[in-house]
Amino acid sequence: MSLPSSNRRMPLSRRIPFYAIVLGIQVVVTLALLEVGARIFDPIGISYYPNTAAFMDTMILEEPIGYRNRPGLEGNFYFHPVTINSIGLRHRELELAPDPSKYRILLVGDSVVFGVGVADEDTIARQLEDRLRENEGEIDGRAIEVVNMGVISYNTEQEMIQYRQLGQQLGPDLVLLVFSENDIEPKMWIFKKRSNSLVTLGQRSYAISLLFALWRNLKDLVWGQQPRIRESAYQEGDPQWESIASSMRELNRMTGEANVPFVLFPRNNTSDSWPLLVELAEREGFPHGLLLPARDPRWRHIDFKKLHSRGGAGHLNREGLSMYATLIHEELRSMNMLGATRETLEAQR
């Protein structure tokens, strides 16, 4: 006697699609719940990736610089308001011309100078300007202005092109370059990653970004810390290092022609980049300092993890960037750089 139809087992040809649909629904529901939870609780600062994707979406793509900030942009990124002025800088409005009433310092760099995870008034440039105005007053009878030239993920080549296209038109009196180890990356590396549609989709999702970060942390735990940049590029003859060296030489040449001092501030002296940068600076004749708060007695007791900005993936908050502003100010004083020209510096040697 045959069993009732309700008790019959579903044929395999129908079971496979049925289970696939059930599994698909479960995956979608799980990802949706994870997306909501990640947006609410922001575990391990995962909001950095969607925020970066959203900000990079606003960039203007153009050669030869690759990309630049969108002039006039206003919005909230990394949990803080970001305002870009009419010439594409995260700085209050200013004309693209020298200002005889200002002693103008250009602070050049990547996301650290730009100020990922802090408000406009908390960037290194703004805090350095406040310190200089408070402690130095005026220089040569002119008000001190520190211009934030930072752009997220810029490398040294882009910073040199930015100075050529924009910076020198501002008539600076001093140019400071804050160097990060990942400045050796190719100039469009962040957009090359985004050329993959799946990567682009994943960057916009909190859930997928969280899963990726957890997988990367697991690999680091099992196989050791994986390098985030190609550290082997820091050697003479490597095309990426040669791009850095030639760009710094060009920055030094352009500023020298305008009788403007150029100072290099690396943020690390423990990697392969440090001896190469020092040798380059000494060979080309431009001064260099060092931004390393962790080795300063004033801050050795601080837990630097507590100084990370929310959703900044290791970028420093206002208090952390305050240390950089302090160190830059002190270094400029010790070098007798404030108010100096290339000619006066040469005369002092």
Image (cartoon, rainbow, N blue to C red):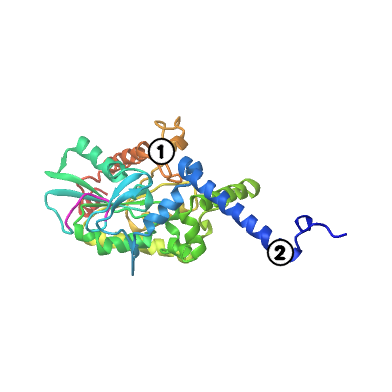
- In percent of width and height, residue 248 lies at 35, 60
Amino acid type, label 1: Pro
Specify start and end residues of the magenta stretch as a single range.
89-95
Q: Earlier in the sequence, mark 1 or mark 2?
A: 2
Residue marked by disc 1 = 293
Is residue 74 left or right of 22 when viewed as pictured?
left
Tag 1's secondary structure?
A: helix
Q: Quadrant of residue 302?
A: top left
Q: Which one is in front, 56 or 219?
A: 56
Per the model, the C-alpha gap separating discs 1 and 2 is 65 Å
C-beta proximity under 8 Å, tags 1 and 2: no
**Tag 2's secondary structure?**
helix
Kindly identify which residue carries mark 2.
14
Magenta: main secondary structure: loop
Please check the rendered image and state whether residue 292 is part of the magenta-colored stretch, yes or no.
no
Q: Is residue 278 left or right of residue 150?
A: right
Residue 224, horizontal then vertical, whole percent = 62, 48
**Residue occupying image coordinates x 75% and y 63%:** 12
Task: Determine if residue 279 is in view.
Answer: no
Amino acid type, mark 2: Arg
Q: Position of residue 345 (x, y in %)?
A: 24, 50
How crowded pointer 1 is (Cα within 10 Å; few <14, some 14-19, many 20+) is rated as many
Looking at this view, name the residue that lies furthest to the right.
1
